[in-house]
Image (tube, rainbow, N blue to C red):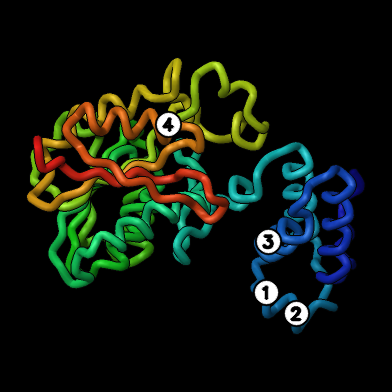
Amino acid sequence: MTALSPESSRVAARARVVDALAARGIETAALDARILVEEALGITATDLALRGDAPIGPEGAERLTGFLARRIAGEPVARIIGAWEFWGLPFALSPETLVPRPDTETLVETALGLGLRPDGAHRVADLGTGSGCILVALLAEWSRAQGLGLDRSLGALRTARANARRNGVGDRAAFAAGDWAAALAGPFDLVVANPPYIASAVVDGLAGEVRDHDPRLALDGGPDGLDAYRTILAQVPPLLAPGGHLLVEIGYDQEAALCGLAEANGLSPRVRRDLAGHPRVVAMAPSRES
């Protein structure tokens, strides 16, 4: 791959990056190129539109050439720039955290649709918080809610704490090391989790952008992908306040299994589908009979 020239204009450099990515079959070449150009040059989309003829300069050329090489090698854009957007909010990433995905916004939407008052002093726990994106998004919507994010990774907890502060909810969010809900004492109005749910044998066959760059700890759900759910569903019901809910993200083929686990643990499940029509979130509350 030939290095980009410092004399190239911003628009020309973007076009060059688009062509290089498209030639390697990257479907999101145009979007990836725009993001990488803006990040490498430290400019906004407005800068690119209004001053597209400005040269990228020596430092910009070096940074953008490096970014392009990493993207061609299969590294996701989010990992290259070290941040991604979720629920309209910015989130820093680290090697210990997943890249927030649009499908996970279905979990936030489901939580907001439970009927909890926007100004209520709700208590929220986020199990396996990662970047903190779910918890931070909920606290941003509920102005008086208090949240606790748990994770086994200290690196993830540091990232989540920084993201809470960055998005203005740091004074209402606490983070602690923990193995799911084992060390928690309730009651909580809401417990959320996006646990690892991919079967161990499938992980190595995932797309390289996921397999090689997302933390395996956040992907591998055990032999059948359900290990974390079994633990969470056994631990959480006693921690729920009256009227409380447990919400978990699931894989597209896990609806029946999760509903069965919920009922076996005295919970009544409801399934929410994502924009593609796949089962994505199971919302659970204690059954009236339990």
Element carrying mark 2: helix
Mark closer to the observer (4, 2): 4
Element carrying mark 1: helix
Q: Is residue 99 placed above or below 225 in the rendered structure?
A: below
Task: Give how far across and how far down residue 137 sits, in percent.
Answer: 36, 60
**Which quadrant holds the N terminus?**
top right
The residue at which mark 3 appears reads as 35
Q: Residue at x 46, y 25 (%)?
A: 220
Three-letter residue code for mark 4: Pro
The residue at which mark 1 appears reads as 45
Q: CA distance from mark 1 to mark 4?
A: 35 Å
Horizontal arrangement in the rendering, residue 158 relative to residue 180 (left or right): right
The residue at which mark 4 appears reads as 196
Mark closer to the observer (4, 3): 4
Q: Nearer the viewer, residue 121 or 16?
A: 121
The residue at which mark 2 appears reads as 49
Badge 4 or badge 2: first in the primary sequence = 2
**Which quadrant holds the C terminus?**
top left
Mark closer to the observer (1, 4): 4
Q: Is residue 21 visible?
A: yes
Q: CA distance from mark 4 to mark 2?
A: 40 Å
